[in-house]
């Protein structure tokens, strides 16, 4: 009589799948890696952190300059010839960019915390204003 080994059972790890899927588009188990993060991905992490700081500064500037919105609109009116309320779209766009970059930074820190290899997807690199890696 032949004895067969039971099939190997993998735990689903849904949280880890979502973490690596959203950050680096690695949804499958075989695509995840516990290898060391490459130097290029460490550079992307530093650039992402720097971009987060710049976006936070820009958001703080536009949040605090609300007393001068009218003067900014007058300046643009004198330059362009028509009146438009520009500070609100700038503030909303800056807040959306800040939320997006903050989300990516939280996902990167979660990758570091669980020991997964960081691999930022190229779409996130392009949309966050970072140049793609030279691979």
Image: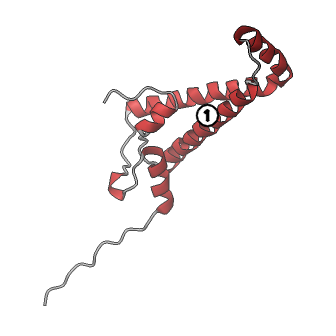
Considering every residue shown, the one lying at the far right of the view is 67
Q: Nearer the viewer, residue 29 or 92?
A: 92
Q: Residue at x 67, y 29 (%)?
A: 56
Q: Is residue 102 left or right of residue 34?
A: right
Q: Classify 5 as above or below 36.
A: below
Please state, as top left, top right, bottom left or bottom right, where the N terminus lies in the image.
bottom left
Q: Report the coloring of the rendering.
A: secondary structure
Residue 15 in the image: above or below residue 53: below
Q: Quadrant of the C terminus?
A: top left
Q: Quadrant of residue 62?
A: top right
Q: Would you place residue 50 above or below residue 32 in this image?
A: above
Residue at (43% x, 48% y) in the render: 116
- Residue at point 82%, 25% (across, down): 66
Local crowd at mark 1 within 10 Å, few (<14), some, or many (≥20)? Answer: some
The image shows residue 134 at horizontal and vertical percentages of 33, 26
Q: Given the current orientation, which residue lies at the most extreme bottom position? A: 1
Place of residue 79 in the rendered image (x, y in percent of width and height, measured from the top left): 72, 9
Q: Label 1, on which residue?
A: 97
Report helix, strand or loop for mark 1: helix
Q: Is residue 120 left or right of residue 51?
A: left
**82 with respect to 115 (left or right):** right
């Amino acid at each position: 009589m032949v004895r067969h080994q039971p099939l190997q059972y993998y735990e689903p790890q849904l949280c880890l799948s979502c973490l690596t899927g959203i950050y680096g588009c690695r949804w499958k188990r075989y695509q995840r890696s516990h290898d060391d993060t490459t130097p290029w991905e460490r550079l992307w992490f530093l650039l992402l952190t720097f971009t987060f700081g710049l976006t936070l500064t820009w958001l703080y500037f536009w949040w605090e300059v609300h007393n001068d919105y009218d003067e900014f609109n007058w300046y643009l009116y004198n330059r362009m010839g028509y009146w438009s309320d520009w500070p609100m779209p700038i503030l909303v766009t800056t807040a959306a960019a800040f939320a997006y970059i903050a989300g990516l930074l939280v996902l990167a820190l979660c990758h570091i915390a669980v020991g997964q290899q960081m691999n930022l997807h190229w779409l996130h690199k392009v949309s966050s204003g970072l140049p793609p890696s030279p691979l």
